[in-house]
Image (cartoon, rainbow, N blue to C red):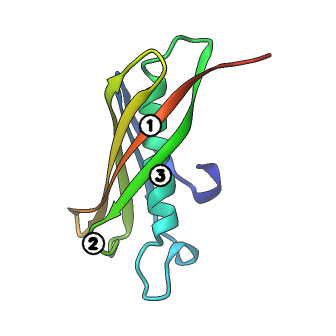
Amino acid sequence: MKTIGARLDLVDDGKVIISVKLKKNMMQQHGFGHAGVTFSIGDSAAGYAALTKMEEHQEVLTSEMKIHLLSPADGKILKAVGSVLKKGKRLIVVKSDIYSIKDEKEKMVATMLGTMVPSIVSS
């Protein structure tokens, strides 16, 4: 996330918000925010949301993630709201909704659904 200048705006139990200011090198050929950036912050927000449900010695890994691109990201900022839908012993089902912000108005541009797998941190 450091590479694209994303920031954590909220970390709560089962919920994380990440935002990024879109720069010229993050745009696709038509001037909209690139789907790769959208996916990246959505996956991270969902993963960090899952991490809030884990023990201190645990991490999570993305097992699978599906994205539905709903509308062009035509704003100056992208915001991903990640949340945990269900935490099980072996799998954590997560979602992330991504919004484009333009003139202080939010428009949902993508929604994601995925599965995280708990992992033990090795020293």
Contact, CB < 8 Å: mark 1 with mark 2? no
Circle 3 residue: 41
Where is residue 1? Give x, y as percent: 58, 49
How many residues crowd around disc 3 within 10 Å: few (fewer than 14), some, or many (20 or more)? many
Contact, CB < 8 Å: mark 1 with mark 3? no
The label on residue 71 is: 2
Where is residue 44? Give x, y as percent: 50, 43
| Point 54% across, 39% down: residue | 62
The quarter of the picture where residue 4 lies is bottom right
Viewed as shown, does residue 90 lie left or right of 100?
A: right
Above or below, 69 against 57 in this view is: below
- Real-space CA distance between mark 1 and mark 2, rounded to the nearest whole angstrom: 24 Å
The label on residue 115 is: 1
Above or below, 108 against 83 in this view is: below
| Point 45% across, 15% down: residue | 89
Above or below, 5 against 81 in this view is: below
The quarter of the picture where residue 114 lies is top left
Mark 1 or mark 2, earlier in chain: 2
Amino acid type of the residue that numbered disc 1 sits on in the rendered structure: Thr
Where is residue 24? Give x, y as percent: 53, 78
Amino acid type of the residue that numbered disc 3 sits on in the rendered structure: Ile
